Image (cartoon, rainbow, N blue to C red):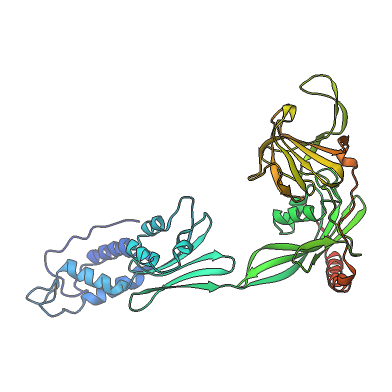
Amino acid sequence: METVAVQPPAAPIATADAAPRGLRRRLRLALAALLGTAALAGAGVAVFEALRPDPPAGLPGVTAAGQVEPTARLAAAAAAAIGPLESAVKVVVRRNDTLDSIFRRLSLSVEDLATIRSLPGIRQSLDFLKPGDVVKLSSLNGGLTSLERRVSETATLSVTRAADGEFAANIIKNSLEIRTAPLHGRISSSLFKTMNDLGASDQVALQLAEVFRYDIDFAQELQPGDTFTIVLEKVWRDGEFVRDGEILAAEFVNNGRTYRALRYTLPDGRREYYTPDGKSLRKAFLLAPVQFSRISSGFGLRWHPILNHMRAHQGIDYAAPVGTPIRAAGDGRVAFRGVQGGYGNVVMLQHSGGVETVYGHMSGFAPALYVGKHVAQGELIGYVGMTGLATGPHLHYEYRVGGVHRNPASIKTLPAEPITAALRADFDAKSATLLAGLAAATQQNPPIAGR
């Protein structure tokens, strides 16, 4: 934007009409540089209207003859035209941002910030910022008038300035609304791509894989043309979509075989998935302790890539990037955690019935994992690596019964406890609603396929 310097004329300006046309144009340009073009149209008119009458002598910038000095005229007229400077901005927090840096960047009063920080009970809610957080700020002539930021999904910090200049802070509670939405898709390239085409997040794809993790190996068994139907929770707040929620019901057709899962909340608050006839989908052991990996070496004889001879491979290797989470295949106790020969970093878990599982070549262990600790099925125990005798990052997984190696892929385990007789009527009533939702979703538009 062009900035033009305004030179005072030799003689005082009596009226706006008496000002030369060129000077009036230069005054407009100078105001444009100061005020911005959006304010120029109204401000320019107000300035020249203010220049028309002569104010009484004795005021600052007024001569004894009652004439206004040109620079004083311009400043007074511009101030009258501008009025109070108000602004409202929405700031997206960047990495390493603090409220101090944000206030200084916006030329807001840091004294106001210090006053707000002194208010009781809000310091942590005020100062704990994460990249991506949003802070809404309003100001008047550089002084803060309000500040708002969300501190959780259900709470918003609101700071306002009263007419007497004092600040007050409140935590506003925001209620969440849970809605349900149907999803119906057909696999073409990947589960993630299909889910994204339906407008759902990757987290929903991971949830779906978790629901059917005992029956379908999503890394090995997914087929083009497989279909799925989901009744999904959607979380809304104040009329705005917040995030995808949990899967209430799901159907997956894998290689022509249909699997169904219905979520049910048990009296102790646990949420489990069951088949429509009340059988638990959860089994004693997972099909694979690493999600979305591929089998790079199966169980049996093979040519060892490092030792260069035939050797029995007494487990399954799952190729995955370094750092991929490894989960306990079943409930158990940590029998060993450390370094052991060709296994490198290894964890050995003992389970009931004389079963032992082994997880080798880890890059690291889960925090607070120690010998003797009890772990639950699906709990994080470590991360994929390539320690020990390994040519690339992968998990070496073994399943032993009474010290004898078994092929983990051939293990068929019993499901957990089914719905009890005492809960059967409640389960059937709630399941009927979920099954109706699945049927309605399936009968809607043809399933979307991920390209």
Q: Residue furthest front?
A: 372
- Give the camera-side residue of 379 and 172: 379
Q: Is residue 121 left or right of residue 233?
A: left
Q: Residue furthest top?
A: 308
In this rendering, the answer to whether 256 lies above or below 233 is above
Residue 190 location (% of width, % of height): 78, 48
In this rendering, position of residue 161 left or right of residue 408: left
- The residue that appears at 47% across and 61% down in the rendered structure is 124
Q: Is residue 230 at least partly visible in the picture?
A: no
Q: Residue 40, image x and y in percent?
A: 34, 68
Q: Residue at x 45, y 60 (%)?
A: 127
Residue 2 is drawn in which quadrant? bottom left
Position of 233 relative to 385 (above/below): below
Determine the residue positioned at 31% across, 74% down: 83
Count of marks placed on residues:
0
Image quarter (top left, top right, bottom left or bottom right) of the N terminus:
bottom left
* Residue furthest left as drawn: 64
The image shows residue 259 at horizontal and vertical percentages of 88, 57
Residue 123 in sight: yes
Q: Quadrant of residue 232?
A: bottom right
Q: Position of residue 285 (x, y in %)?
A: 83, 48
